[in-house]
Image (spheres, rainbow, N blue to C red):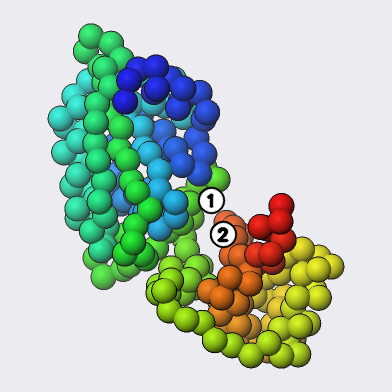
Amino acid sequence: MSREELDRLVALGENAFVEFKQRVPEAMRFAKEIVAFANSRGGTVLIGVDDSGEIRGVKDSAEEEYSLVNAIENHCEPPIGFTMSRVPVSRKREVIVVRVLPSPEKPHFVRNGDSMTAYVRVADQSIEASREALRVLRANPDEEVRFEFGEKELLLMRYLDRYGRVTVKQFAQMAGLKRKQASHTLVLLTRAGILELHHDEKEDFFTSAAKAGAA
């Protein structure tokens, strides 16, 4: 990456694909960002850029790279592929560019002892993946999905036509289902390409995939 390309990327601000860090943070915090990008659509972490978008660079690139590699290799499971490069921003300072591609081995987790937590990227935040998100991530995209489109599914589509979005809790209430049953149906319809799952910090929701495509 050239300095001009770095300037253009930073000018866009933090978003679903870009994260700024002045330095490599505590290992599990950094692993969280990497896991979220791998579980979503990939992204870039810029080490040496502060939250306001000021390009400061880091003094000791080797030390920062050691810390970030340690965080990724020791706290991301399964292993995540990434690349690193350096962009000089002054005579003594560089920005480290860490690129993460969307992973074919989803879901990935941050490992903290015996605890395993998955994250996804939402706008400029990395949030914990919901149960529904994990089921979608774990699903084989090549597996044929079969289901019966019955009364409850018809009720769901009518609700979406009227309100545009639905949560697991809302679907369970309207259809008289237990949460687990409602979740199973919504995930199944998502895997079949009928619904689209949207991650949200408060509560994930689903929309009609047909309308999303038409938009």
State the image quarter where residue 118 is shown.
bottom left
Which residue is label 2 attached to?
199
Which residue is label 1 attached to?
122
What's the distance in space between the residues labelled 2 and 1, CA to CA? 6 Å
| Residue at the extreme top | 91
Q: Is the residue under label 1 in contact with that under label 2 (CB below 8 Å)? A: yes
Q: Residue at x 80, y 73 (%)?
A: 159
Q: Residue at x 36, y 64 (%)?
A: 106
Name above or below for residue 6 compared with residue 165: above
Residue 167: % across, % down = 67, 70
Name above or below for residue 21 compared with residue 11: below
Name above or below for residue 4 compared with residue 126: above
**Mark sitting earlier along the chain (2/1):** 1
For this view, does 54 lie left or right of residue 116?
right
Total labels drawn: 2
Specify the quadrant that holds the N terminus: top left
Secondary structure beneath disc 1? strand
Residue 42: % across, % down = 40, 48
Secondary structure beneath disc 2? loop
For this view, does 68 lie left or right of residue 128?
left
The three-letter code of the residue at mark 1 reads: Val
Residue 207: % across, % down = 68, 65
For this view, does 150 lie left or right of residue 19?
right
